[in-house]
Amino acid sequence: MIEERIASLQGDITMIRIVRCLAYATLVLAVVTAPAWSQGKGKGPEKVPPQDDSTIGDKVREVLPASQPVFATQEVTLIRNWFQTNRSNLPPGLAKRETLPPGLQKQLEKNGALPPGLQKKIQPFPPELERQLSQVPTGYKRVVIAGNVILMDTKTSVIYDVIRAVIP
């Protein structure tokens, strides 16, 4: 009986050694072949350049520095006149004349970021006036904050231009 038990234990020990060897072999194989997996595609003759659907204008814009959108002189005049003429027809959010504290007013400057406290005070730009102005680039929008018209980047909240005190 003891001899049978010893023989059984020796078989178990042998099985454990075999499993360990297989585990080490798998680990070594994974480590050795990992650099080959990370190599990527070689530079072979079958490499096809990606299809370029961009226009000549797109290629020129890629080379030129990006221009910053600002209010044109005619737009400033049109905006001021529109708000003076339509003062009585403004939506409730724009109709109330509110002013900012001096500290917040100073933060409304070109190339500055819109403070989080002012983001709550953003009023939409009147759509009928928006249609009369040139289209702003994608990602930018005109808004009204406390009587000021602001051109801003919607993602970064960077202010690109400000027309102060447009609502009389």
Image (cartoon, rainbow, N blue to C red):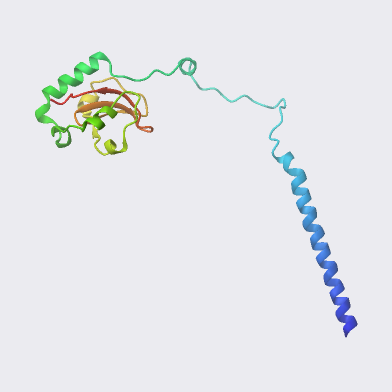
Q: Is residue 34 left or right of residue 162?
A: right
Q: Residue furthest right?
A: 3
Q: Residue at x 69, y 38 (%)?
A: 38
Foreground pick, 149 / 107: 107
State the image quarter where residue 65 is shown: top left
Q: Residue furthest left?
A: 88
Foreground pick, 56 / 125: 125
Query: Which quadrant holds the C terminus?
Result: top left
Q: Residue furthest bottom?
A: 1
State the image quarter where residue 79 is shown: top left
> Residue 113: image x %, image y %?
34, 30
Q: Is residue 145 left or right of residue 57?
A: left
> Residue 131: image x %, image y %?
24, 24
Total marks in image? 0
State the image quarter where residue 21 is shown: bottom right
Q: Is residue 111 left or right of residue 42?
A: left
Query: Which quadrant holds the N terminus?
Result: bottom right
Foreground pick, 150 / 41: 150
> Residue 68: image x %, image y %?
37, 19
Q: Residue at x 84, y 75 (%)?
A: 9
Q: Residue furthest front?
A: 103
